[in-house]
Image (cartoon, helix red, strand yellow):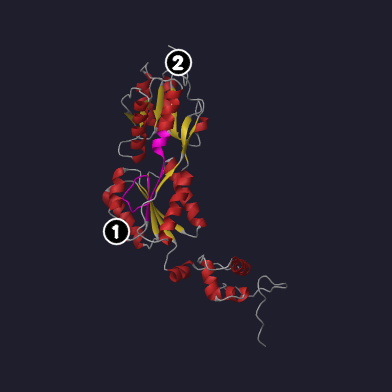
Amino acid sequence: MTPSAPDGPGSKGRSRRNFAGARPVMADVARLAGVSKQTVSRVLNDHPAVRPETREVVSEAMRALGYRPSRSARSLASGRTRMLGVISFDAARYGPASILTAINTAAQEAGYLVSSIALDTADHDTVVEAVDRLSAEGADGVIAIAPQLWVGRALAETTGLGTPLVVLESALDEETPLVTGDSRTGARKATEHLLGLGHATVWHIAGPTGWTSADHRLASWQSTLRAAGAAAPAPLVGDWSADSGYDLGRSLARRPEVTAVFASNDQMALGLLHALHEAGRSVPGDISVVGYDDVPEAAHFLPPLTTVRTDFAEIGTRSLRLLLDRIDGPGGRPRVGTLVPVDLVVRASSGPPPVR
């Protein structure tokens, strides 16, 4: 006697097929849902032509059967690997690490795996080799976190490989989408905040030369001072580390004319606070300090740090969405400059200048 087909997933008295340990396949899902295998395939690949009610019936059948689609089968059917590549530099720092976490989360939600390559050096050959490797692995697209100008120049030579590319921080060309935090606005807000408190000028501990965000913050700090008619002291250049902020802070602490300092990241601001404390300079009584990034510890510095908050999670999520749009959409679309807004977070490290 031939057994009857199981009831549909929405019917009363639904039965579930006994696979005796066998893994359910697409045909089993189609049979239980009462649809064709092609319809199941369309649901798996998020085809827009599938009606919501049909999508729900198929999804319920997959849940009932414990069906897990084969990634390799989906790749063969769609012509895609469902894998994305990410190239990162300086991944141990808070900003890049937070961006990577957001990219991985957003990719997982979109049904993609992520293959990451973290590079210790940013020389031309290493960058090109990383892109070549991800392309050879069949990555549907690549996100490159390119904080340094020379990284951007190396990446620019890889755009002819045909793999969709989205870049964070450094603009490459008119065809490659760019996602970045709004460093110019952030530096302006930090500088205007200190000037608005009554400081005659603002000193600056800059990030390393050649880093896009550092260069943008430096230029914006200078232009904001000029617009306010304030003198622009020579910037002091650090390397993003608390140690460099400490070393430069010891020099600033010996200058009685210094009443306000804007540091290009929170780690250098932390080192600055340490140096000022050792020198007996009160913050903000003698010198106000503003940082950049709003790392999770910034609210617990002594004193709590006024800083510019960058939404690194939003940068990562936007870059992933932009890459998927480029994979799905027509080629040759113009570069989309996506500036992620920043906010000034005022805490206890900034105040009016001391009364002379």
Question: Residue at coordinates 46% horizontally, 32% vertically from top-left?
Answer: 307
Magenta residue check for 184: yes
Location of residue 148 in the rendering, given as x and y in whole percent from the top left corner: 32, 43
Task: Using a 10 Å C-alpha cutoff, classify the residue at mark 1 as few (fewer than 14 neighbours), some (14 to 19) or many (20 or more).
Answer: few
The image shows residue 233 at horizontal and vertical percentages of 32, 24
Lower position in the chain sequence, tag 2 or tag 1:
1
Determine whether 109 is above or below 314 in the image: below
Residue type beneath disc 2: Pro
> Mark number for residue 303?
none
Name the element at disc 2: loop
Res. 182 image quadrant: top left
170 or 68, nearer to the observer:
170
> Residue shown at 49%/53% (left/top)?
106
Callout 2 environment at 10 Å: few (<14), some (14 to 19), or many (20+)?
A: some
| Res. 354 mark | 2
Q: What element carries label 1?
A: helix
Q: What amino acid is found at the position of numbered circle 1 in the picture?
A: Gly
Name above or below for residue 36 compared with residue 210: below
Which residue is found at the position 36% from the left and 22% from the top? 252
Q: In which quarter of the image is residue 235?
A: top left
Spot occupied by residue 188 in the image (x, y as percentages of width and height): 41, 32
> Percent x, y for residue 287?
43, 20
Residue 247 in view of the camera? no
First to last magenta residue range: 165-187
Which quadrant of the rendered structure holds the N terminus?
bottom right
Residue at the top extreme of this rendering: 356
Identified at 45% across, 13% down, the residue is: 355
| Count of number-bearing discs | 2
Instruction: Give me the C-alpha separation between circle 2 and circle 1.
Output: 57 Å
Q: Please tell me which residue lies in front, 146 or 175.
A: 175
Q: In this view, does 320 lie above or below 248?
A: below
Reading the image, the residue beneath label 1 is 160
